[in-house]
Amino acid sequence: SEITDGNHDYVTIKYDGETGAQIWVSRYDHADLNDAPSDVKVDAAGDVFVTGASRDPDTQNDGATIKYDGDTGAQIWLARYDQDGFDDTGGRLAVDSAGDLFVAGWSADGPWANMVAPANFVTRKYDGVTGTLLLVERYDHADSDGPNAIALDDAGNVVVAGDSYDIETDNSVYLTLKYALDSDDDGVPDSGDNCPLVANPEQANNDGDSEGDACDVDDDNDGVDDILDEC
């Protein structure tokens, strides 16, 4: 990060892989306060995601995540995450095969006490195209929980790992979580859901293709969209 007005900013730079020449540089500053990036990832199209912690005068630190155009460095979208005005971070990133983004960071559910933030694991999924927040999973184990790694398995499930600190025992333990994502909250994990973004717990699929009736525009596969189909 680079210092502006005595505070740090996100600075993201793309270099030519062969020559090392700078191709573009993009900076992010929020409210002339501290912005500290923590991870960067590139999707299959070559666009760039950056996340970290970004200070706000009203909501303390927020998890700020940005997508940049990989060719020009232009900002495509910005998403800031805040939980009830307490400290939140970006943390670590993973990109799935559809280009959607997962962010694992910590998020406090109250003020700091005894120099410890009452932090929880918070795992977020964003639409890679629009930056829309698709889901949030929070996990609270002990007094302070903080993830430091995230990965996706071949089925699209999310694995998050970090540590959990207990003030009373002054003891930290390793903590690993695996989420079977269910974006439409219909009780069927995304990995096996024939309409992962449209609730369809029955998984009805009239024509037996890869899309369930709830999201298939031609659910009898006769070449006529359902909205125009008389039968």
Image (tube, grey):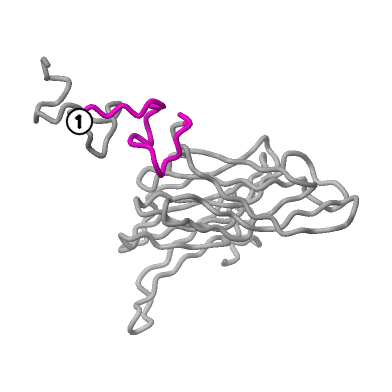
How many numbered marks, from 0 up? 1
Specify the principal SS of the magenta part: loop
Q: Quadrant of residue 190?
A: top left
**Residue corresponding to mark 1:** 207
The quadrant the N terminus occupies is bottom right
The boundaries of the magenta stretch are 185-207
Locate residue 199 relative to residue 10 in the image: left or right. left
Where does residue 183 sit, x and y in percent of width and height? 45, 37
Where does residue 180 sit, x and y in percent of width and height? 50, 44
- Indicate whether residue 190 is drawn in magenta: yes
Where does residue 38 sit, x and y in percent of width and height? 58, 62
Q: Is residue 149 above or below residue 141?
A: below
Task: Residue at the far top: name it.
Answer: 230
Locate residue 43 relative to residue 134 in the image: left or right. left
Residue at 66 percent of width and 62 percent of height: 6
> Foreground: 231 or 185?
231
Locate residue 223 relative to residue 85 in the image: left or right. left
Residue at 37 percent of width and 61 percent of height: 73
Query: Label 1: few (<14), some or many (≥20) within 10 Å?
Result: some
Task: Residue at the far right: name it.
Answer: 168
> Foreground: 25 or 98?
98
Q: Is residue 39 above or below residue 23?
A: above
Residue at 55 percent of width and 50 percent of height: 64
Q: Amino acid at mark 1?
A: Asp
Where does residue 9 sit, x and y in percent of width and height? 57, 60
The quadrant the C terminus occupies is top left
- Indicate whether residue 128 is drawn in magenta: no
